[in-house]
Image: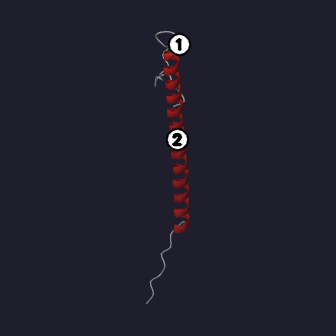
């Protein structure tokens, strides 16, 4: 005797397709966020290197301006 196939409303294939789309969307969003954070770190390190260079050449005023980001003032992050 053959077992009867399991039927669901909606079909199981549709459920897994929706789930896969959602997972792919979340993965892509996570990658974009990770990429943006990486580029922010690169930009901050570039500013730090330039600040050190200009301090050694005595082009920047002493003490140098405060350029660190404050989480309370950054609305985009």
Q: Position of residue 58 (x, y in %)?
A: 51, 12
Asked where in the image residue 18 lies, by quadrant, the reply is: bottom right
Percent from the top left, x then y, of residue 1? 43, 90
Q: Which residue is mark 1?
A: 60
Q: Secondary structure at mark 1?
A: loop
Q: Secondary structure at mark 2?
A: helix
Residue 21: x, y in percent?
A: 56, 56
Q: Which residue is mark 2?
A: 33
Which residue reaches farthest top?
Answer: 62
Q: Please tell me which residue lies in front, 62 or 43.
A: 62
Indicate the position of residue 46 as horizontal and vertical percent values: 53, 28
**In this picture, is 3 found above or below 46?**
below
Residue at horizontal 48%, vertical 75%? Answer: 6
Q: Which of the 4 image quarters holds residue 3? A: bottom left
N-terminal label among 1 and 2 = 2
Task: Give the residue at x 47% y 9%.
Answer: 62
Say which residue appears at 54% left-offset and 67% top-offset: 13
Labels 1 & 2 near each other (Cβ < 8 A): no
């Amino acid at each position: 005797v053959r077992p009867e196939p399991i039927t669901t409303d909606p079909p199981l294939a549709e459920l897994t397709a929706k789930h896969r789309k959602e997972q792919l969307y979340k993965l892509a969003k996570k990658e974009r966020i990770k990429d943006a954070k990486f580029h922010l770190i690169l930009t901050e390190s570039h500013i730090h290197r330039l600040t050190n260079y200009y301090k050694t050449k005595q082009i920047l005023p002493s003490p140098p301006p405060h350029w660190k980001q404050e989480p309370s003032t950054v609305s985009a992050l």
